[in-house]
Image (spheres, rainbow, N blue to C red):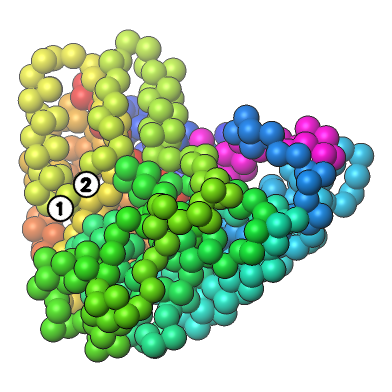
């Protein structure tokens, strides 16, 4: 099995009862199940030179003169390599792809080996000029797709930043500032994406709208709770149900109208007045030739984690809690921990697996941490020295907040090591500093995929 957790042995020094290891294994299996290599091979098959099957749908390649491929998101590097291999007929060394680009996060380009697809490095999570260049290149590729073009896109989490392309009247610095404001107030990812789409020249279906004809097929790895295709990657090829008026309501909800950069507020207000074109809506005829297909999501990862736990502990009852665990890391994380305590009273071997994406409101000068590690601290405040509970909280992309960790493990041993600093770690948003000192921060490095967060808890 591929070694996903790089500091596994250090974390396991805290495993006094052998219950952390099955949870670490389950987390690794969850990530492996949604790797782009796995997802693309399971969803895309070149049956012969003239027939491509995608999720059971047959595409007659003889109808098209050219195949374009556009890839963006945290999974782009591995996805580019795999799709080139898939679209190379047996017995041939030449791919059927005529032209393609893959927009990758920092540090991925040098690891990616492709023959046809050009690899463009961009930045995440803060948009930069490299993202503007990447976004413009992707739009240029789309603009050359005509009625004889099959345009395949592979979209994963992080695309919004990697291929950022602000509207002409919104400077990049204001787009960056707006993104920071939304993250700072703890806005939900759907709200962040609604704002992004309405100040972007590529999102909200606009990439699909740039094509002049042909078939557009988007294979999507969902990093959004609820799998709303209009929010994943800010909906490059998906219709958008949100409006400029909705964006104004989001500004009012978080009481940030006075903080919004002037260019952004002016653009949104003009849009609400009908003076700026809206994002593409579901009734736009462009979507008659666009197929948006989700090939991987959090539920799939959770099922893999559940299967792993059941395989290692057949006598343990495992419950799936869903993939919509959202809300404030402190409030909801505390409720979740209290629920675990209630189930412990049943006196049975139980495990819970679930996914979601908590939010954290940052202090003015936050330390190193992330939402998974922050929630783990809140859970430990409730569970305390409970020797019967072990848990793993993990971001599937391998990056939790502004730290280098993916998440955290905890049990009573870890609690004993950090108990005196938990309150400080919470108030200062420095969960990683605290957990790392106890060998409880889980390190994977960038995983090459993203289906948001996974948690696994066992009661013994």
Residue 165 % position (x, y): 47, 76
Q: Is residue 417 left or right of residue 203?
A: left
Residue 200 % position (x, y): 41, 73
Looking at the image, is 434 positioned above or below residue 16?
below
Would you call the spot at circle 2 few (<14 residues within 10 Å), some (14-19), or many (20 or more)? some
Q: Which residue is mark 2?
A: 326
Of the 4 image quadrants, the one containing the C terminus is top left
- Number of numbered discs: 2
**Image mark for residue 328:** 1
Residue at figure coordinates x 44%, y 33% from the top left: 300
Residue range in magenta is 33-52
Relative to the observer, which residue lies in front, 132 or 241? 241
Looking at the image, is 259 positioned above or below residue 204?
below
Residue 242 % position (x, y): 29, 60
Residue 70 in view, yes or no: yes
Q: Secondary structure at mark 2?
A: strand
Residue 83 % position (x, y): 69, 48
Looking at the image, is 190 positioned above or below residue 220?
below
- Quick check: is 41 in the magenta stretch? yes
Q: Is residue 112 left or right of residue 256?
A: right
Q: Are marks 1 and 2 in contact (CB under 8 Å)?
A: no
Based on the displayed image, in which of its 4 quarters is residue 140 positioned?
bottom right
Residue at figure coordinates x 26%, y 40% from the top left: 324
Cα separation between marks 1 and 2: 7 Å
- Quick check: is 403 in the magenta stretch? no
Would you call the spot at circle 1 few (<14 residues within 10 Å), some (14-19), or many (20 or more)? some
Residue at figure coordinates x 13%, y 14% from the top left: 347
Residue at figure coordinates x 47%, y 34% from the top left: 29
Relative to the observer, which residue lies in front, 347 or 335? 335
Residue 101 in view, yes or no: no
Q: Secondary structure at mark 1?
A: strand
């Amino acid at each position: 099995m591929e070694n996903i957790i790089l500091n596994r042995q250090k974390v396991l020094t805290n495993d006094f009862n052998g219950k952390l290891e099955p949870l670490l294994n389950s987390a690794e299996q969850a990530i492996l199940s949604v790797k782009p290599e796995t997802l693309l091979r399971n969803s895309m098959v070149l049956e012969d030179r003239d027939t491509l099957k995608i999720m059971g749908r047959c595409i007659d390649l003889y109808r098209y003169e050219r195949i374009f491929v556009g890839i963006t998101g945290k999974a782009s590097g591995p996805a580019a390599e795999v799709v080139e291999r898939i679209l190379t007929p047996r017995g041939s060394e030449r791919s059927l792809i005529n032209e393609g680009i893959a927009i990758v996060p920092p540090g991925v380009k040098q690891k990616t080996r492709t023959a046809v697809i050009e690899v463009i490095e961009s930045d995440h999570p803060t948009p930069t000029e490299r993202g503007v260049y990447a976004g413009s290149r992707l739009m240029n590729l789309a603009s050359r797709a005509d009625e004889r073009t099959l345009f395949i896109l592979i979209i994963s989490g992080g695309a919004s930043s990697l291929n950022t392309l602000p509207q002409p009247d919104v400077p990049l610095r204001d787009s960056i500032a707006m993104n920071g404001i939304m993250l700072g107030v703890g806005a939900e990812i759907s709200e962040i994406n609604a704002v992004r789409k309405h100040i972007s020249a590529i999102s909200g279906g606009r990439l699909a709208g740039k094509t002049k004809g042909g078939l557009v097929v988007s294979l999507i790895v969902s990093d959004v709770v609820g799998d709303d295709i209009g929010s994943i990657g800010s909906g490059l090829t998906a219709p958008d149900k949100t409006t400029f008026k909705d964006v104004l309501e989001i500004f009012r909800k978080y009481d940030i109208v006075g903080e919004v950069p002037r260019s952004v507020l002016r653009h949104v207000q003009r849009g609400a007045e009908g003076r700026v074109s809206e994002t593409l809506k579901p009734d736009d005829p462009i979507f008659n030739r666009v197929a948006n297909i989700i090939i991987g999501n959090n539920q799939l990862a959770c099922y893999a984690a559940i299967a792993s736990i059941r395989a290692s502990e057949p006598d343990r009852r495992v419950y799936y809690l869903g993939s919509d665990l959202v809300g404030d890391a402190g409030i909801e994380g505390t409720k979740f921990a209290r629920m675990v305590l209630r189930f412990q009273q049943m006196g049975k071997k139980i495990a819970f697996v679930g996914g979601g994406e908590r939010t954290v409101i940052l202090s003015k000068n936050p330390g190193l941490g992330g939402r998974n590690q922050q929630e783990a601290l809140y859970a430990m405040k409730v569970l305390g020295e409970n020797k019967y509970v072990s848990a793993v909280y993990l971001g599937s992309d391998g990056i939790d907040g502004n730290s280098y960790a993916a998440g955290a493990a905890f049990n009573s041993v870890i609690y004993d090591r950090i108990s005196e600093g938990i309150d400080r770690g919470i108030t200062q948003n420095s969960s990683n500093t605290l957990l790392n000192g106890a060998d409880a921060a889980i390190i994977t490095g960038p995983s090459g995929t993203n289906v948001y967060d996974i948690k696994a808890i066992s009661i013994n």
